[in-house]
Amino acid sequence: MFKRVVGLSALLPFSVLSQSLLIENATLISPEQDQSKQSAYVRIRDGRITLVSFSPLAAEAGEQRLDATGKFLIPGLMDSHVHLSLMPGLLPNGEPQALQKQFEIQQPRSYLYFGVTQLLDPAQSAEQLKVFKSQPLHPDIYHCGATPILGGYPTVFTGPEQASEMFSYMIIRADTGIPVPEGLDPAEHTPEAVVAKMASEGANCVKVFIEDGFGERSDWPNISAELLSRVKQAAKQHGLPVLAHANAIDMQKIAVDAGLDVMAHGMWNWNQYRQAQQMPEAISQVLDRVLKTGMTYQATFNVMDGLTATMLPETLSDPNYANVVPRDILSWYQTEPAQWFKQELLSDFGGLPTERIRQIQQNTIDNGERVIQYLYEKGHPMVLASDTPSSPTYAAQPGLSTFNELQHMHKVGISLKDILAAATINNARAFGLEQDYGTIEPGKMANLLLLNSDPLKSIEAYDSLDKVILRGEVIDRQSLAASQ
């Protein structure tokens, strides 16, 4: 859909690459193939696949060899909705900073631990991602430019002055009556100006926020249809897809009306239809237009799953947390100060009993599932997008939340074959990256996974990783664990 040509040097942060690697005797599973293929040999040079053969290949002089007998070779996974940098559950004042530093070191390794070799952060600039990219091992990272309007979500939580510092691509909507902060030139904050700026700074997409309030609120300034149209036109000129933050039926209708390219959330807020037992016609009409236009649709089950898990005392007992969360951070999560977000959630529900809160959350999850089932049953392709973390919940952790998203996708009926496509080629196509990722073919970036189990037979296979191959470099999975 969208073509972005990225030079090899921009994707290879390591000073030394393995010159040549030969993967031998793997069972190859690539989403463009109808079925898995036995006895595959894959040659990699300078970080890219150069040859795929189903006849034995002799190793060349000095070539590294990787015996994959009995193992399954698939493309590396892409999570197309993550928020990097801040440790989940950190206190609102940014403390404790010592734990934040530990998190910054482990975060990219945790994504790799679960086979995520490509990421898209839809809300941070290249400058804000420098810490992530400075780590010696990290997935390939892409980003959107986020364009909130002054006074709208999420700047409603920061105030105008701080918003002007946090959001360099902010758009000023003149008719809101919100004073423009001193020193901010409105001419530099039009849709045309901010999209041109983000394109020049290497953004791969544009993110808009279609949100007039959470819960019963609907009084936040929202982006207008006219501004949305101008964002869409400017993005088209630069070859960038436009993502919409929208999770309620009325907000998603606005995004569809504007002809945007990606819905960055599932529709779990059904508003006046939230108690409906059958799919309301008003919702099916919006979804039918998603189907007709081919709009990329991110389920982001992890948003509600993370909020629900925050309320459960047994959440952190899942042994996988120890694999992706450093020990000191995991211990801090057990303390009273770390429960601040849980207490905030309880307050938001006005003192309702915990069991009643869980019922409300489950109903919201059920509605989001029904939307995805409706689209999938009508043949709409899925993409893997976890929105990790969408809130300050310690339940949403890098890598693990991506795996949980895969499990939830399978739970609602998406086949294992289509889940593989969602996590690989579908995401690559949606963001114009299919020339580099998504399949196992000559010319593609050598971001690959070697599994001990068949992902076409079990969703748990994605937790059976043996090796991660990142730009041709072979990494043992256990070396990436937080406990190492």
Image: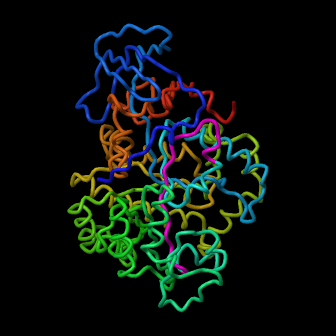
Is residue 361 among what the camera can see? no
Tell me where residue 124 sits by quadrant.
Answer: bottom right
Tell me where residue 331 sits by quadrant.
Answer: top right
Is residue 333 among what the camera can see? yes
Residue 130 drawn at (x, y percent)? 62, 50
Q: Nearer the viewer, residue 377 or 28?
A: 28
Tell me where residue 336 sits by quadrant.
Answer: bottom right
Image: magenta residue range: 132-151
- In this rendering, the answer to whether 340 lies above or below 159 is above
Q: Nearer the viewer, residue 468 or 309?
A: 468
In percent of the image, x 47 and y 91: which residue is there? Answer: 175
Residue 95 drawn at (x, y percent)? 77, 58
In percent of the image, x 39 and y 20: which residue is there? Answer: 43
Left or right of residue 80: residue 13: right
- In this rendering, the answer to whether 123 lies above or below 35 is below
Residue 372 drawn at (x, y percent)? 33, 57
Q: Nearer the viewer, residue 461 or 263?
A: 263
> Per the image, is 346 magenta?
no
